[in-house]
Image (cartoon, helix red, strand yellow):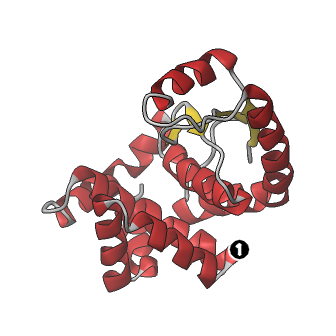
Amino acid sequence: MIPKVIFRYSWIYDQLRREEFEKKSKNYPSPKETLNYIKKADKIWKKYENKILKEISRITELEWEEKEIQCYVVGGGMNFSDPLTISPKKELSYFIDVLTHELIHRIFAPKKNYQKSEKAWIYINKKYKKETWNTRVHIVIHAIHKYIFLKFFGEKRLEREIKIMNKFPEYKRAWEIIQKEGYQNIIKEFKEKIK
């Protein structure tokens, strides 16, 4: 089963983010601006949704357990996979990239998928035990994401992602390991450990 991503706006959730965000910056979008952004993002996402979600499932050898995945779009702040929350990006293509990243995380979350992939994660944690937990997780996530980038979007978009991630030391380190060991090798080793 391939799920559908349903973009949602929650005024309460957005208001909490607004209060947090406005302590640092005054450039928080209005609810109307966020709702308009959701319409644009949804239109672009629908072009890729089925292909990306199928490929994430195929490459991980895990099945999606949800028929629908609610994605909250709020004006600012951190992006994360559960509850799936994304903030608007200047370029809609980058919004799609961030959403894809969080969906890769999300496929590992359901109990059945976690149990199925647990040995693979234990292997990754042992192999890269000198790295931080966040780096270890993102070695796998970024390797899968690199595969998705190259299959659907190309080298230039991948390069943009790596450049953005270089601002975050743990993500940067994960990309360095991927460049050194090869994303195909990391994915292969990981999949060999999945039950």
Q: Position of residue 17 (x, y in %)?
A: 53, 26
Helix, strand or loop status at disc 1: helix
- Looking at the rendered structure, the number of numbered marks drawn on it comes to 1
Q: Quadrant of the C terminus?
A: bottom left
Q: Say which quadrant the N terminus sits in.
A: top right
Up/down of 83 relative to 78, above or below? above
Q: Position of residue 125 (x, y in %)?
A: 23, 56
126 or 39, which is in the foreground? Answer: 39
Q: Residue at 55% x, 30% y: name it.
A: 83
Q: Is residue 177 left or right of residue 152?
A: left
Amino acid type assigned to the residue bearing label 1 in the image: Phe
Q: Quadrant of residue 189?
A: bottom left
Q: Which residue is mark 1?
A: 152
Q: Residues within 10 Å of mark 1 (few under 14, many from 20)?
A: few
For image coordinates 46% across by 72% down, the residue present is 162
Which quarter of the figure has residue 180?
Answer: bottom left
- Taking the view exactly as shown, the residue that stands out farthest to the top is 12
In this rendering, is residue 177 above or below 35? below
In the foreground, 14 or 72: 14
Residue at coordinates 46% horizontally, 26% vertically from top-left?
A: 20
Say if 42 sits above or below 185 in the image. Answer: above
Image side of residue 193 versus residue 70, left or right? left
Q: Residue at x 61, y 48 (%)?
A: 63
Q: In the orientation shown, which residue stands out farthest toward the front? A: 26
Q: Position of residue 96 (x, y in %)?
A: 68, 56
